[in-house]
Image (cartoon, rainbow, N blue to C red):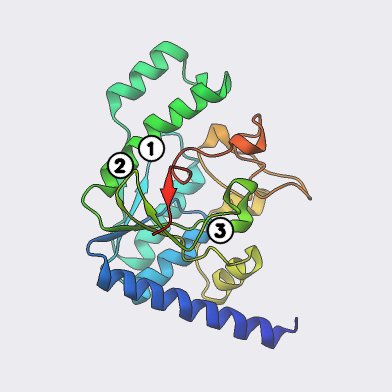
Amino acid sequence: MDTLMKEDLLADKIEAVSSLLISIELSYVPACFACSFGIEDMVLLDLIYKHAPKIEIFTLDTGRLPQETYELMQKVKERYARPVNIYFPETQKVEAYVEKYGPNGFYESVALRKECCRIRKVEPLKRALAGKKAWITGVRRGQSVTRKDLLLSKWDTDHKLQKFNPLIEWSEDEIWDYVRRFDLPYNTLYNQGYASIGCAPCTRAITIGEDIRAGRWWWEDAATKECGLHLKRLSIG
């Protein structure tokens, strides 16, 4: 595909996502965007600020994020001059987990890792989504085998609201083309070989040829590599 065709295709996808976000802003009040400050989320954050500013943007601070993620959060605040709401895990539950299993108990088993994710991510997400009519994520099918069957929009039966994945059909190259075209800030860990960034102790760089999410919970089987935010029971809506 030549450069002009790639640019036209990206322009069409930008227009489609922008139109979808405007529609969500008008039809699902209130709506929100769950931003993890990954590279896909930087694209959606930029499009929401430009085209659908009434959509709330929030993030989950697990307490174990890399310093580079906090640096990016600061850059976003300075660039857009609009707050991103931050949700934290409940202190008592974190303390109880650490007392019982240790600060890095999540390495011991999939069950303990998922319990850590539940405390630090899943429960705060429930608070963030309370009272909302729709939530938006930066999930793409190409990210992992666990996401290949996800749809653009589905009814989230667990949170009882509509869930949208506007970038579901975008390629990794298209994401980066958008970032470069609009000179967006991004997490500098991507420059060090990271392809998917979560909590610091559960994320590492990947090598050439590895799956894009191979650096997430790298000690587990690929089929288990989700924290529980995106693989709940969903029915088509």
> Which residue does the numbered mark 3 point to in the structure image?
140
Q: Which of the 4 quarters of the picture holds residue 83?
A: bottom left
Q: Which of 26 and 192 is in front in this view?
A: 26
Q: What residue type is labelled 2?
A: Lys
The percent position of residue 12, horizontal first and vertical second, equals 54, 82
> Which residue does the numbered mark 2 point to in the structure image?
126
Q: Which amino acid does label 1 sit on?
A: Val
Q: Distance between the residues labelled 1 and 3?
A: 20 Å
Q: Are marks 3 and 2 in contact (CB under 8 Å)?
A: no
Split into 4 quadrants, where in the image is the C terminus? bottom left
Left or right: 208 in relation to 158: right
Q: Do the residues labelled 1 and 3 touch (CB within 8 Å)?
A: no
Eyeballing the image, is 165 above or below 124? below
Q: Do the residues labelled 1 and 2 touch (CB within 8 Å)?
A: yes
Residue 122: give its label: 1
Q: Is mark 2 on a helix, strand or loop?
A: helix
Name the residue: 36% across, 75% down. 50
Q: How far apart are marks 3 and 2 (CA)?
A: 22 Å
Name the residue: 34% across, 43% down. 158
